[in-house]
Image (spheres, grey):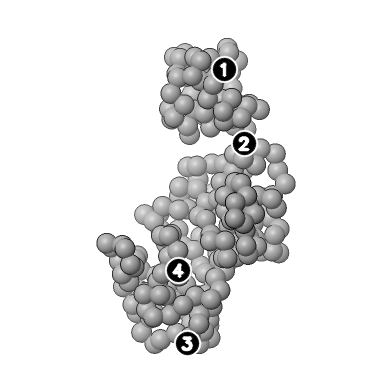
Amino acid sequence: MRLDKFICKSTALSRTQATAKICDGNVLVNNVVIVDVATQVHEDNAITLNGEVLTARESRYILMHKPADTICSNIDEAYPSLFNYIDVENASELHVAGRLDADTTGLVLVTDDGRWSFNIITPTKHCQKVYRVGLSRAIADDVAVKFAHGVQLQGEQQLTRPAILEVVAPTEVLLTITEGKFHQVKRMFSAVGNRVVSLHREQIGAIQLDVEVGQWRYLTAEEVNSFTN
């Protein structure tokens, strides 16, 4: 992780305060003064601040049921942040592994472990995300085949990665994708002449949503490890 983030994760300092300490030459990594806040460090490195050895706090892994009209930012903007629902210390250190739009509900995974979230959001890791999609009109018979081969999104050079479409009802489907382009689900259905009217994420990898709207819980060790194997 970045050195400034490590300092925040191992002390009570804010990002601004940590930056000042680093730039003032008060931080050593393996006995070498480091003044670049973006330097990548590992928990196994010997990192000291004013001569005191630092140890990062244990990483946190949280499952949450995101309500509608909330955003995955750490601060309130046009809509309130979903972090208003998560009552933990140092919430500013957390981030969402795979953001959802303000009007999209459902499963989000929250962590302060960047390497872990990388395995969830990077397309080459093939982490499946399952969405329940409400449509403005009945799904056409050929859409499943089109999604399986990939569709062209406006402004994109490459086709979408193969996706799995399961029809639940004429205007309700389950869509499984392994990438997360900007507004991807909405754009995929727009590309085949339909429109998304509701969007809800039910599953990420092997983890299924199992808490009520606005509620959250810590992941089990088994759930956490399911994204590192």
Give the mark toward the camera: 4 or 2.
Answer: 4
Q: CA distance from mark 3 to mark 1?
A: 61 Å
- Residue 156 screen position, x and y as percent: 31, 62
User: Disc 4 or 2, which lies upstream in sequence?
Assistant: 2
Answer whether residue 220 is visible to the viewer in this image. Answer: no
Q: Residues within 10 Å of mark 3 (few under 14, many from 20)?
A: some
Is 145 on the left or on the right of 76, as rendered?
left
Give the mark toward the camera: 1 or 2.
Answer: 1
Q: CA distance from mark 1 to mark 2?
A: 19 Å
- Residue 201 screen position, x and y as percent: 55, 66
Marker disc for residue 58 = 2
Q: Residue at x 30, y 66 (%)?
A: 159
Marker disc for residue 138 = 3
On screen, residue 114 above or below 138: above
- Residue 118 screen position, x and y as percent: 45, 47
Q: Evaluate if marks 4 and 1 touch, with contact meaning CB atoms under 8 Å apart.
A: no
Residue 58 sits in which quadrant?
top right
What is the three-letter code of the residue carrying label 3?
Ala
Look at mark 4 in the image and give the residue it sits on. Answer: 185
Look at mark 1 in the image and give the residue it sits on. Answer: 49
Q: Residue at x 70, y 43 (%)?
A: 88
Q: CA distance from mark 4 to mark 1?
A: 46 Å
User: Disc 3 or 1, which lies upstream in sequence?
Assistant: 1
Q: Residues within 10 Å of mark 1 (few under 14, many from 20)?
A: some
Helix, strand or loop for disc 4: helix
Answer whether residue 145 is visible to the viewer in this image. Answer: yes
What is the three-letter code of the residue carrying label 1?
Leu
